[in-house]
């Protein structure tokens, strides 16, 4: 098996992961359903343990999705912006998860807004004519 040098692990025998889906499909498969779930779940204060756990888990998914966004192949001049936005998204997801774990609705709403701002910042900078501007 021949592995491209750029995809070789330190040991030289394993293929490193690459993005599988084009960005538009990726957003539709991963981000849109997650966004819709969080938007619905954070519309009103939740009182149930299961609802808060769903929010926490969705927020952790957003934080992990930031890693998948960060591995996208983009033009060299967009790499630092993509990495910065991915890092911002991950931080926002982790902060939302923490607020959900504490069952703090006001903080969760604040962190949800920060997460949406992170998405919008990336859309605005890297896909100004294609990326939607989301509402919390």
Image (spheres, rainbow, N blue to C red):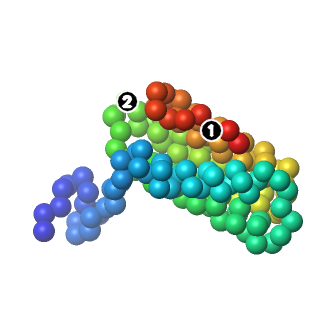
Q: Are marks 2 and 1 in contact (CB under 8 Å)?
A: no
The residue carrying mark 2 is 77
User: Furthest-bottom residue in view?
Assistant: 50
- Distance between mark 2 and mark 1 Cα atoms: 25 Å
Q: Is residue 94 visible?
A: no
Mark 1 — residue?
Answer: 134
- Tell me where residue 136 sits by quadrant: top right
Along the horizontal axis of the image, is 21 left or right of 121? left
Q: Position of residue 95 (x, y in %)?
A: 71, 53
Asked whether 74 or 27 is in front, the reply is 27
Q: Residue furthest left?
A: 1
Question: Residue 46 at x, y = what percent?
Answer: 83, 61
Residue at (76, 67) in percent of width and height = 51
Q: Earlier in the sequence, mark 2 or mark 1?
A: 2
| Residue in front for this viewpoint, 119 or 43 | 43
Q: Which residue occupies 18% across, 56% down?
A: 4
């Amino acid at each position: 098996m021949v592995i491209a040098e750029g995809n070789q692990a330190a040991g030289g025998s394993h293929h490193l992961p690459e993005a599988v889906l084009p960005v538009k499909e990726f957003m539709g498969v991963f981000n849109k359903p997650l966004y819709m779930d969080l938007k619905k779940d954070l519309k009103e204060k939740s009182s149930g343990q299961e609802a808060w756990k769903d929010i926490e888990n969705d927020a952790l998914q957003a934080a992990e999705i930031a890693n998948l966004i960060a591995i996208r192949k983009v033009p060299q001049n967009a790499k630092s912006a993509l990495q910065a936005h991915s890092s911002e998204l991950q931080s926002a997801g982790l902060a939302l998860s923490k607020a959900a774990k504490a069952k703090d609705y006001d903080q969760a709403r604040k962190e949800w807004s920060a997460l949406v701002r992170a998405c919008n910042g990336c859309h605005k900078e890297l896909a100004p004519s294609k990326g939607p501007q989301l509402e919390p």
